[in-house]
Image: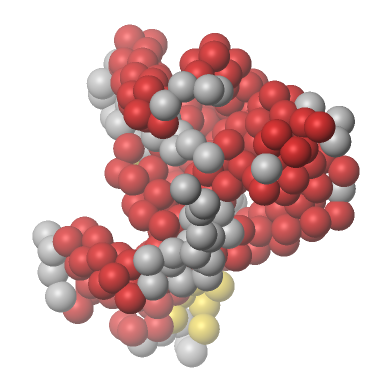
C-alpha cells in the first residue's frame, strides 16, 4: 500500500503544480513572456484566504472566492503597470521586470504579515475516504485538488476553443500583428490572460496551503519554480502539456522522496527534466516551431 499512497500523494501534489503551470503556459503561449512573479501570486492568494477566514470569520468558500477575485485584480494591475509598457522591449528587460515584481510582492507580504509562519485552515471539511479496510486512506484535500485540476484543464480547453475571447487568445498566440489587423484588441486579450492565470494561482495557493498548512511570504517560490519546470516538461504553451507535466513532476518528486532520498528529490526532478529536454527539446506535448531569420 505504500506505493499506492505515494502515487496518490504524487498525483495530488502534481495537480497543484498543474494548476500553477497552466497559468505559466497561458501567459507564455499568448504574451510570449515568462512571468516569474506568478509564484508570489500564489502566496498572495493564500494570505487573502487566510485573512478572510481568520480575521473576518467568514466561511472558507468566501475566502477562496475573495482570493480568486483579489489575485485576478492583482494580475491585471501588475500586467498594466509592469509589463504593458514593455510590449516592444527586449525579452531580457521583461524578465528582469518579472523578477523585480516577484521581490516586490514577497517583501510587501513580509511587511504586511510578517515573517512568522501562519497556520492555514483547511479549505476542505468532509471526511477522508478509506479503502482496503482502512489500509489506504485518501485525504479529502487530495480528492478536491485532483478534481479541481481536472475541472480547470477542461474549462480552459473549452474556453480557448469555444469562446470569442479564447479564439482571440489563440489568434494573438499565433501572430499579434495579424490579430490586431483583424480587429482583436491585443492589449485587452493579454490582460485577460494575466487575469485568468492569476485567478488560477489563487486556487492553487489555497489548495497548496490546505495540503501543507504553513503560510509564509516565500510559500509560492519553490512551487512556482517547480510548476514552471512542469510547464517546460510538458511543453510550455500547451494546456494538456502543462497538466501532464505537473502531474508527472508531482509523482516523480513524491516517489523520489519515498524510495530514494528526501534531500535528493529536487535534484532528481530537475535531472529528469534535463533528460526529457535532451530527447524532446519542446517538451512531452510541445511542438517545435521553425522561425524564419
Q: Which of 52 and 281 is in front in this view?
A: 281
Residue 213 in sight here: no
Check the image and report above or below for 157 versus 28. Answer: below
Q: Which residue is drawn at 63% across and 22% down?
A: 76
Question: Which quadrant holds residue 161?
Answer: bottom right
Q: In the drawing, does residue 119 fall left or right of residue 121? A: left
Residue 41 in sight here: yes
Q: Nearer the viewer, residue 151 or 99?
A: 99
Q: Find residue 230 and report its horizontal and vertical position in percent.
A: 41, 58
Q: Which of 195 and 95 is in front in this view?
A: 95
Check the image and report above or below for 130 versus 10. Answer: below
Q: Nearer the viewer, residue 133 or 239?
A: 239
Q: Residue at x 39, y 72 (%)?
A: 280
Q: Which colour scheme is used?
A: secondary structure
Q: Find residue 293 and report its horizontal and vertical position in percent.
A: 47, 48
Q: In the drawing, does residue 233 fall left or right of residue 171? A: left
Q: Residue at x 48, y 36 (%)?
A: 33
Count of number-bearing discs: 0
Q: Find residue 274 and report its horizontal and vertical position in percent.
A: 26, 65
Check the image and report above or below for 138 versus 149. Answer: below
Give the residue furthest to the front: 293
Amino acid at each position: 500500500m505504500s506505493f499506492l499512497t505515494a502515487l496518490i500523494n504524487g498525483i495530488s501534489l502534481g495537480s497543484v503544480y498543474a494548476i500553477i503551470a497552466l497559468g505559466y503556459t497561458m501567459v507564455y503561449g499568448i504574451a510570449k513572456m515568462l512571468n516569474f512573479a506568478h509564484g508570489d501570486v500564489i502566496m498572495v492568494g493564500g494570505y487573502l484566504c487566510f485573512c478572510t477566514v481568520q480575521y473576518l470569520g467568514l466561511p472558507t468558500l468566501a475566502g477562496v472566492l475573495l482570493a480568486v477575485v483579489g489575485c485576478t485584480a492583482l494580475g491585471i494591475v501588475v500586467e498594466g503597470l509592469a509589463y504593458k509598457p514593455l510590449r516592444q522591449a527586449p525579452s531580457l528587460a521583461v524578465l528582469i521586470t518579472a523578477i523585480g515584481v516577484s521581490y516586490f510582492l514577497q517583501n510587501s507580504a513580509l511587511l504586511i504579515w510578517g515573517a512568522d509562519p501562519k497556520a492555514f485552515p483547511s479549505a476542505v471539511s468532509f471526511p477522508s475516504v478509506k479503502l482496503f479496510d482502512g489500509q489506504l486512506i485518501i485525504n479529502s484535500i487530495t480528492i478536491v485538488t485532483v478534481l479541481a485540476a481536472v475541472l480547470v484543464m477542461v474549462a480552459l480547453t473549452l474556453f480557448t476553443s469555444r469562446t470569442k475571447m479564447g479564439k482571440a487568445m489563440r489568434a494573438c498566440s499565433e501572430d499579434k500583428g495579424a490579430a490586431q489587423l483583424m480587429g482583436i484588441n491585443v492589449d485587452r486579450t493579454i490582460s485577460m490572460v494575466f487575469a485568468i492565470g492569476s485567478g488560477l494561482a489563487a486556487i492553487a495557493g489555497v489548495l497548496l496551503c490546505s495540503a501543507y498548512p504553513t503560510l509564509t511570504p516565500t510559500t509560492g517560490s519553490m512551487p512556482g519554480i517547480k510548476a514552471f519546470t512542469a510547464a517546460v516538461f510538458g511543453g510550455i504553451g500547451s494546456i494538456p502539456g502543462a497538466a501532464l507535466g505537473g502531474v508527472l513532476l508531482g509523482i516523480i518528486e513524491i516517489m523520489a522522496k519515498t524510495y530514494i532520498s528526501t534531500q535528493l528529490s529536487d535534484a532528481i526532478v530537475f535531472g529528469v527534466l534535463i533528460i526529457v529536454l535532451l530527447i524532446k527539446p519542446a517538451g512531452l506535448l510541445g511542438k517545435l516551431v521553425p522561425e524564419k531569420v
